[in-house]
Image (cartoon, coloured by chain):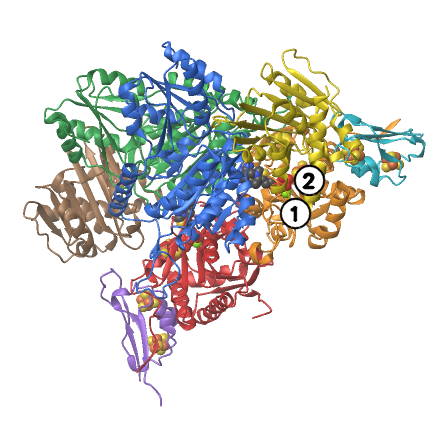
Chain colours: A purple, B cyan, C brown, D yellow, E green, F blue, G red, H orange
Amino acid sequence: MTKVTFREERCMGCELCVHACPQRIVTMAKHINAGGFHPATVVQQDKCTGCAMCALMCPDVVIEVEREEKQ
Amino acid sequence: MTKVTFREERCMGCELCVHACPQRIVTMAKHINAGGFHPATVVQQDKCTGCAMCALMCPDVVIEVEREEKQ
Amino acid sequence: MLHEIIIAGFGGQGILSMGQLLTYAGMIENKEVAWLPSYGPEMRGGTANCAVTVSDIPISSPVVSEPTAVIIMNKPSLIKFEPMVKPDGFILVNSSLVDQKVKRPDIKVYEIPANEIAEEMGNSRVAGNIMLGALQELTGVVSIDSMEETLKKVLPPHKHNLIPVNRQALEKGAEFVRSK
Amino acid sequence: MLHEIIIAGFGGQGILSMGQLLTYAGMIENKEVAWLPSYGPEMRGGTANCAVTVSDIPISSPVVSEPTAVIIMNKPSLIKFEPMVKPDGFILVNSSLVDQKVKRPDIKVYEIPANEIAEEMGNSRVAGNIMLGALQELTGVVSIDSMEETLKKVLPPHKHNLIPVNRQALEKGAEFVRSK
Amino acid sequence: MSKILMKGNEAFGEAAVLAGCKYFFGYPITPQSELPHYMAKRLPEVGGVFLQAESEIAAINMVYGAAGAGARVMTSSSGPGISLKMEGVSYLAGAELPAVLVNVVRGGPGLGNIAPAQSDYFQATKGGGHGDYRLIVLAPSSVQEIVDLTAKAFDLADQYMNPVMLLADGILGQMMEPVELKDIKPNIPAKPWAVNGMKGRAYRNLIVSVHIVAEDNEKFNLTLQAKYDKIFQNEVLYENYKMDDAEFVMVAYGSSARLAKGAVDKAREKGLKVGLIRPITLWPFPSERLAEAATTAKAFLTVEMSLGQMVEDVRLAVNGVKPVYLYTRTGGMVPVVKDIVVELEKIVQGGGK
Amino acid sequence: MSKILMKGNEAFGEAAVLAGCKYFFGYPITPQSELPHYMAKRLPEVGGVFLQAESEIAAINMVYGAAGAGARVMTSSSGPGISLKMEGVSYLAGAELPAVLVNVVRGGPGLGNIAPAQSDYFQATKGGGHGDYRLIVLAPSSVQEIVDLTAKAFDLADQYMNPVMLLADGILGQMMEPVELKDIKPNIPAKPWAVNGMKGRAYRNLIVSVHIVAEDNEKFNLTLQAKYDKIFQNEVLYENYKMDDAEFVMVAYGSSARLAKGAVDKAREKGLKVGLIRPITLWPFPSERLAEAATTAKAFLTVEMSLGQMVEDVRLAVNGVKPVYLYTRTGGMVPVVKDIVVELEKIVQGGGK
Amino acid sequence: MRKVFSKPASLSDKPFHYCPGCTHGIIHRLIAEVIDELNIKEEVIGIAPIGCAVFMYDYFDFDFLGGAHGRAPAVATGVKRVHPDKMVFTYQGDGDAAAIGTAEIVHAAARSEKITSLFINNAIYGMTGGQMAPTTLLGQESTTSPEGRSKEMAGYPIRLTEMLATLEGTVYAARVSVHDVKHIIQAKKVIKRAFEIQQKKVGFALVEVLSTCPTNWGLTPIEATKWLEQNMIPYYPLGEIKVPKEV
Amino acid sequence: MRKVFSKPASLSDKPFHYCPGCTHGIIHRLIAEVIDELNIKEEVIGIAPIGCAVFMYDYFDFDFLGGAHGRAPAVATGVKRVHPDKMVFTYQGDGDAAAIGTAEIVHAAARSEKITSLFINNAIYGMTGGQMAPTTLLGQESTTSPEGRSKEMAGYPIRLTEMLATLEGTVYAARVSVHDVKHIIQAKKVIKRAFEIQQKKVGFALVEVLSTCPTNWGLTPIEATKWLEQNMIPYYPLGEIKVPKEV
Ligand SMILES: Cc1ncc(C[n+]2csc(CCOP(=O)(O)OP(=O)(O)O)c2C)c(N)n1
Ligand SMILES: Cc1ncc(C[n+]2csc(CCOP(=O)(O)OP(=O)(O)O)c2C)c(N)n1
Ligand code: SF4
Ligand code: SF4
Ligand code: SF4
Ligand code: SF4
Ligand code: SF4
Ligand code: SF4
Ligand SMILES: [Mg+2]
Ligand SMILES: [Mg+2]
């Protein structure tokens, strides 16, 4: 299981994560955040592989990625 | 015939011409010029080949070299 | 009359051009005018605002500390400028973008859903002109004709086709506040 | 007493050290002293001079414009400093190096063939000390003992062997002018 | 000629071009960058050269070269960038080269900020560089005056063979106002002293600022002094605003003079007999005008966007004859008309500081 | 402790070392180069670092770094080199960092020459850099005072978190006099604000000079002003020389003060009641002392090695109460005692300029 | 759940003020990660530039010093000479390092100051409004080269890293990019190496990072990463240019 | 009698003020000879440095401009941009060009200013009293490296010409020496070439000339020429480092 979390209020809507995600599951939300941007978000969490490509690309450290600890 | 002339009053006695002359005919005079230096001079003009090595080396443009015009 | 107007919003909303349009139109009407942008660190990705002064007599200060009217294009600007408006002055809020209400009872408040009106018109870019149209209707600072004249002068020829829709937007804005 | 002394000559003649020797000796005698070199463009390959002030009371100006005594070690210095000497002051000329005569009638002139005396002593380097010895004899600015004392303090130990010849030179200089 | 709407920074540029300035060397810094931007576009149109230097130091030395080569040339900067030019400015003054420098002052010291300020007054008028030299310092207070004084700056520079500084601030640089580009015409004298190769000249030209012999340098400095005296006699500029019956005299220049004018009007509405003397040349400073005013005025109030710099020149001019008060905002803050009026009221009632 | 004979430039260095200065960053320039030479030899002996920078600009910024890192640090220069440091000086003042700068003034402007001068007074005291800031400026007039004031400079710098300038000139830098290196002891306060890595600290340290919001920058400038006021109240230094019954007061500092003293003595021999006030701190300037003297004196004569700079501060202090005359030599020339006396006689007889 | 990726500890929690998609932020994060991994947060002293990153000290939680435009290498020298055992790094834009600060970075390199120098090349002056930088490419438009940079007028873009690599004092010189994830990973390795070299006191270590400026390039963030790849990398080739033998 | 050697016409008759045996004088003469041979005396504008050659304008009989220490390339840029058809050259010492003026010469090169730049490397600051220059050799004593230059404290001597040759704008870069007649003859050829390149408007042409400073090296003039040969040339190899294709 993996979890990718976006600190939405920090997102500047640059879309770099959208292009970085190999699963193509990051999209831009319709709504606008406090900064006036459409924030990035992942809807299909289940398709996420936890590769963290999105997070590595994000210039604003918006994204956190977690993965189930393997024994 | 060649002629090598030293503008004695400009000579700073550095001796670079002495070492540059392949004929070893440049020497330092005993007397002191207005600047307080022993000026360079050539005594055996006849041995001078007019090669101008002394003049090329002189930092103070003291030396003029002339040679008989060949036809 | 001395009009001291502040236009404020996000960078990228064309705030500075709105101010320039007003200023130029004032000049065409042979009024004394001055335009002063904020150029501080808030520029980058943040807020932008400019002060426009239109007057019948020489302008002493281009710095507007007590505006006679403000146009508000985002929420941070409302927070910043509401307290500064001169008692009895105008505050025009683009309610498409600002959900907060004006609190001061001593100023004249107009909420104008400029983006919605613009989209109705089929051109989301003219929200600013709708606000300007409303302002001119309320304050008479400059005429719509002068603003159209300005566009003719400052737009390059290949953009002159945009003038009619811009004029229409000015009129829509005027209409909207007239109908209130 | 206020001694304002200028020592002047070519760079490389040890002019500045001569002045320092005098100054240091004055300090040893608990007098007020100051030493000021010329440091202008004339330094390079050209002339050098320094001003030494030795006084019983605090020194107002280290700049000497009217010397009570000058030591002249080359011709350009004679030309430059002869006019400045205080009436009744001393001018000590190293006549081994300067052929020109002093013209002023109102100052005390001493021609000292310092290089020749030095070479007689077998050490051409002490010409400066011969001049200093003469100066002290004439003006009493500092004692020869203090100058010797100074050399002991400022010379590094491995050069202390030079002190006797230096002292001798001071005495020779003194002798020379005494014998005049 | 009809009016056009121009930003102050651009007005500097356009006026310079009209005055025959074909060379601009600069380095970007807020709040003056629109000036180099403008020149980058404009100069190639008139066959001139805009060159972005690697630093303000390089820029001022390029100016030195171009001025020495006989051209009308300009540079501009602000705050830290102006400080970096100080060595070069001293060299320009020392070599007696004509050049025009624009300082769009921002808040200091150090990095400070980019807001409008007047805290470089001392640096401009007393000499931020080394040695006894003076810049001619002109302080416009509107975009129109930016145009007029820029043209004048080039003429003064050539006439007196002296660098001229145009001292503005963030407000003046950034604001737009209508301007008339009257008939500014390049009025460039012959420059037989310029280094441009000896061809056609019987003598060679040499431009340096060194006088290694102290006597020579003193002589040179005294000729500079004589030139400065002449400038002081001939070139003082100021504006009187409602001074005819003024009992209280404000002194302010540039942007703060506009606010001071507003305050004069407001104060007059309240019945206070207030006027304004606005120095247009900061150096030469209108000391005589102030001394004269001191004979009739009751008190002076200097308004500045600094901790108080010009006030020293005001005090020197008034010379103890009447009290001189000071009202300032600094660090990028701008005085507010009504606060000035409050200060005026205090002074009228015998307070002030 | 017994006296030793020292050159002024070296005395700066030795006193700095004794005061605990372990870092020196500089760039050669006449007439101060003996100071870096001395430091190049001396600092390694005490485990310090002498580094010749690639320029005066690099040097002042190295000073900025070392001061920020918590060290006692010095730099020195003259003329053009000091001008190049002006941006950095404004940054030091803006970041409130303690550092000591030596300016051994030479003749200007431009390249000028290397002879002694006092024509950087304005630059030092009014601010050659941008923004509202002040240096503490100390003006020794003997080699002994170079020693004493250098030690004091480091203490003042640390106490007030402000750069301090020692303003000398070619004479003072080049001359030798006996000095006592009294018991100067490093008296270095703790510097919990220094950047030296967070280890052992719960907070991180930050040193900058930026206050991008104008309100903040104004607040900062006002705290600077408050600090400057405090310095003005507490740190003014001057010497009275034969002032008890003086009717004519000379004002002079540094080398020219020595000549002025000579002139006082000569004038007294002629029966003129002349005294000297010698400012030791040029900023803060001893304005109060002068104002006080103005109540009893008949006239003032400022003696300077410049076209006349300090005279403005004298006039500001005297505030029109008594005439202030000026006698100057400039461009590297040094006033002559008897000429000063002639000037004094003129003033006594009602002349002077 | 194990954090695969989260904010490094050396970063403060303050949001960056950079424009959307500006890669200054990525570089900041990489620095923080390296400092965390080397466990040197308590030893490190950062020198902030003047440029868009002027406020970078707000984003890090360790000691910082901000000096004048271009002078960071001199400031760092002052700090490092006082604290030779601490870790000092500079972070400079291309205007800061390759224009106004040319002399300072050249001489810090020549002296082989034992600091880590990060050089952020975005081929433009970001902060002041998109003027030409010494690294602006030929033909590239900017507010001071409105018709595109011409070599006749403004000369050639400077390859600062190659130039500095010719100096003996430069012991490590490399160029990386952060326009995509692969290069970001590579960039971090190189930055880490540059810090490790400082730990070993070998000498001056320089890393040039190619970075985007969507705002002044007039491109979207995505377009900007492509523009960097297609235009900058060919002129500014990536890789380690100089590696010390000892490391 | 035909003159085999006499004072070139572009030299004035004023005696040099240099120390005995200082090779600044030789370089001056070579410049004058080249200017005479190219017949450009009426076109040429010299930019004097600050350094021992500060008064060089006294020795030449054509237009001269003297600016601030290190800034000659910027001053030359100002002149050349105003008079693109005139011949502009700079003459800078190693302190002037390689220390305080680093940024200016780097950027004049990067911009490929069409000037001729002479760089006189005597491994010392002559004028101000023998301080360490950026080009002072390791171990070499100077008034600011009294124990000899140590690489730990002061880093490595800069090979400015090699560094500048990495820039595309530098079209010609060469190093010559004037310590003996053979090299003097060679030096003149190279200097001439650097002027010819300017005539052809190719770009920035740089000639480094190794020169002696007997005074501050503490050697006799003869010893100084030997010291140069034995110590400087190994570290600063002679030759043409970069030659434009077109020439
Ligand atoms: C002395 C000085 N000159 C100019 C400036 C204005 N200035 C601030 S940042 C900058 C250039 C920034 O460009 P760069 O270094 O490339 O950084 P970027 O913003 O692109 O990251 C300039 C010119 C200044 N602050 N100080
Ligand atoms: C801004 C400035 N800093 C310092 C100086 C002092 N200065 C004059 S020449 C010089 C160095 C000269 O060395 P170099 O360039 O190598 O020339 P050289 O005398 O060896 O021929 C220095 C530091 C100055 N004139 N201006
Ligand atoms: S962690 Fe990988 S798969 Fe998951 S959203 Fe991010 S980029 Fe896509
Ligand atoms: S990369 Fe970061 S800032 Fe950009 S859209 Fe994605 S989450 Fe937002
Ligand atoms: S010309 Fe040749 S042979 Fe004659 S003196 Fe000179 S070097 Fe000797
Ligand atoms: S080289 Fe010239 S200056 Fe030197 S000794 Fe010979 S003639 Fe004299
Ligand atoms: S201007 Fe450019 S470099 Fe600066 S923050 Fe914006 S995108 Fe980044
Ligand atoms: S100091 Fe050195 S470089 Fe200068 S003139 Fe003398 S020998 Fe030549
Ligand atoms: Mg950049
Ligand atoms: Mg040299």
Question: Which residue is pictured at 39% across the width and 38% down the height?
Answer: F129
Q: Where residue E308 sits: x, y (%)?
A: 28, 33
- Tell if the residue under mark 1 belongs to the same chain as the one under mark 2: yes
Q: Secondary structure at mark 2?
A: helix
Depth check: give the residue in front, H92 or C1. H92
Q: Where residue F184 sits: x, y (%)?
A: 43, 46
F328 with respect to A66 (left or right):
right
Name the residue furthest left: C105
Query: Disc 2 marks which amino acid?
Result: Ile
B37 with respect to E350 (left or right):
right
Quick check: F319 above or below D154? Answer: above
Depth check: give the residue in front, F165 or E52. F165
For the N terminus of chain E, which image quadrant?
A: top left
Question: Which residue is pictured at 46% across the width and 37% down the height?
Answer: F144
Task: Bin the neighbour count of mark 1 within 10 Å (Cα to Cα): few under 14, some 14-19, many 20 and up.
Answer: few
Parent chain of label 1: D
For the C terminus of chain E, which image quadrant?
A: top left
Query: Disc 1 marks which amino acid?
Result: Pro
- Residue holding disc 2: D163
- Residue holding disc 1: D157
Task: Bin the neighbour count of mark 2 within 10 Å (Cα to Cα): few under 14, some 14-19, many 20 and up.
Answer: some
Quick check: E243 above or below E171? Answer: above
Quadrant hosting ligand 10 = top right
Q: Is residue G141 visible?
A: no
G230 with respect to D21 (left or right):
left
Sequence-wise, the earlier of marks 1 and 2 is: 1
Q: Secondary structure at mark 1?
A: helix
